[in-house]
Image (cartoon, grey):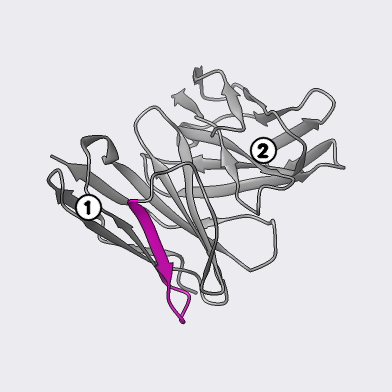
Amino acid sequence: EAGVTQSPTHLIKTRGQQATLRCSPISGHTSVYWYQQALGLGLQFLLWYDEGEERNRGNFPPRFSGRQFPNYSSELNVNALELEDSALYLCASRRTGTNEKLFFGSGTQLSVL
Amino acid sequence: SQQGEEDPQALSIQEGENATMNCSYKTSINNLQWYRQNSGRGLVHLILIRSNEREKHSGRLRVTLDTSKKSSSLLITASRAADTASYFCATDAINSGYALNFGKGTSLLVTP
């Protein structure tokens, strides 16, 4: 069974550009979570999608947005990139309506120059 | 916002020794989970302990939970060099909307 897959592995952008990160959950998982891991700050919760809807978001500005597609894959968009957006972006999935463990992808390392 | 806070931030031990990491949190929880991260990549789930449990074991891992003190500890016995990684606690807070909140992690170095 395939795990959570994220693409691209690395992404380099310049200030003001937009970045799009993609995530495919484990088959059968409909809940997708996005986390930002900046250096020294641990994992910060960004967004939670379930059954195609945004269910919860963390304390991030509106330029962080995303969506979930009918096949439950998800996309994270970051507009008007700032230097401090440089971080590892992690996607995780689990079955809907549970508070069980999360399965993580390997992440996308976003560098904003 | 961070819910869990791990202590210590960094820990260095020799192979064969035990490693203990602590986690404190702020609000009532459904469960607490521990994860491991190698080399800044994806996290791997280690163990989950529910709010009505006090202790749980999995192989060389032992987790305790004290809800009155809002704290948990992770003990790794007979550490190996391969245990070198960052360890995070994550809390599933009541009314969090199923979002796990992670701490900043403990960086463990196990030297041969």
Q: Is residue B108 magenta?
A: no
Q: Position of residue B107 (x, y in %)?
A: 47, 26
Judge left or right: residue A49 versus residue A13. right
- Horizontal arrangement in the rendering, residue B48 relative to residue B13 (left or right): right
Which residue is the site of mark 1?
Answer: A10
Q: Total of numbered circles in the picture? A: 2
Residue drawn 66% across and 47% down? B96
In the image, which is nearer the foreground, mark 1 or mark 2? Answer: 1
Residue at point 46%, 66% (across, down): A3
The reply to whether the C-beta atoms of the residues labelled 1 and 2 are less than 8 Å apart is no
Residue at image position (41%, 51%) is A90
> Is A55 in front, or is A1?
A55
Camera-side residue: B10 or B98? B98
Q: Amino acid at mark 2?
A: Arg
Q: Chain of mark 1?
A: A
Q: Is residue A97 above or below residue B19?
A: below
Q: Which residues are magenta?
A: A63-74
Location of residue B98 in the rendering, given as x and y in whole percent from the top left corner: 65, 54
Q: Look at the numbered disc 2 and give the secondary structure of its residue.
A: loop
Q: Chain of mark 2?
A: B
Q: Is residue B77 left or right of residue A104?
A: right
Which three-letter amino acid code belongs to the residue tagged 1?
His
Q: Residue at x 55, y 32 (%)?
A: B2
Residue B58 point in image, percent of width and height: 71, 45
Residue picked out by circle 2: B60
Q: Measure the C-alpha gap from mark 1 to mark 2.
A: 34 Å
Name the secondary structure under disc 1: strand
Disc 1 crowd, CA 10 A, few/some/many (<14, 14-19, 20+): few
Q: Percent from the top left, x then y, of residue A25? A: 47, 69
Q: Residues within 10 Å of mark 2 (few under 14, many from 20)?
A: few
